[in-house]
Amino acid sequence: MPRALLVAAGLSLLPAFAADPAAPRIGYVDMKRLLDNAPQVVAGRQRLEREFAPRDSALSADETRLAGLRSRYDRDAALLARDEAEALKREIDALDRSIRRNRDNLRAELKTRSDQELDRSWRDINNAVVEFAREQNIDLIVPSPVIYASPRIDITDQVLDRLKRQHGAAATPP
């Protein structure tokens, strides 16, 4: 019975602890939402799209050319001289290998550049979360994923607003 009294006494103190201004303040931030919507991340994605667009277009043109050559080979192989048919087949095979190699290189380089952009954005996002927490006297920020976080402690929108302001300030020269 004394143990039950101790638990009851402890539980009765919880409202006083929660009302205590010295009680720890906790916030929650949805990192996935920040990484999907932060203007720094969006701008990084757009930079990568512009950077890789010419190579992607060239690859698409090669793929279209390959499809045309395959179609020609399927249609005309029986009508072509053996040397011509073999030359066309070698050209198809060489172009196919070149496309696969270029696609693999493009993917690898895009992955590397995406990781670099994400690292840069990640630092900006973490710094914004820490600055916000310090300004608001928040003692602990819990990042996602979590099982549950009350909307009352969700600071994601405030951090996202801060990131938008920082990005806008960085984009406009003084």
Image (cartoon, rainbow, N blue to C red):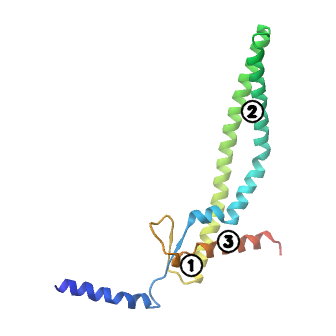
User: Decide: marks 2, 1 in contact (CB < 8 A)?
Assistant: no
Say which residue label 3 marks: 163
Q: Which badge, 2 or 1, is on the more N-terminal residue?
A: 2
State the image coordinates of residue 173 (x, y, percent, origin top left): 83, 72
Q: Write the residue at 66% across / 66% down.
A: 38
Q: In the figure, 173 relative to 5: above or below?
A: above
- 34 with respect to 71 (left or right): left
Q: Which residue is the site of mark 1?
A: 133
- Foreground mark, 2 or 1? 2
Query: In x, y percent, where is residue 65?
Result: 79, 29
Tell me if residue 140 comes above or below residue 12 in the rendering. Answer: above
Q: Residue 75 bears which disc, if any?
A: none
Residue 162: where, in percent of width, then height?
67, 75
Image check: 81 left or right of 22?
right
Residue shown at 54% from the left, 84% from the top: 137
Q: Amino acid at mark 1?
A: Ala
Mark pair 3, 1: CA separation = 14 Å
Amino acid on which the number 2 mark rests in the picture: Glu
Q: Residue at x 45, y 83 (%)?
A: 24
Q: As displayed, is residue 116 above or below residue 92?
A: below
Question: In terms of secondary structure, where does tag 3 sit?
Answer: helix
Q: Residues within 10 Å of mark 1 (few under 14, many from 20)?
A: some
Q: Categorize mark 2 by other alpha carbons within 10 Å: few (<14), some (14-19), many (20+).
A: some
Residue extending farthest to the left is: 1
Judged from this view, the residue extending furthest toward the top is: 81
Q: Report the residue marked by disc 2.
A: 63
Image quadrant of residue 47? bottom right
Sequence-earlier tag: 3 or 2 = 2
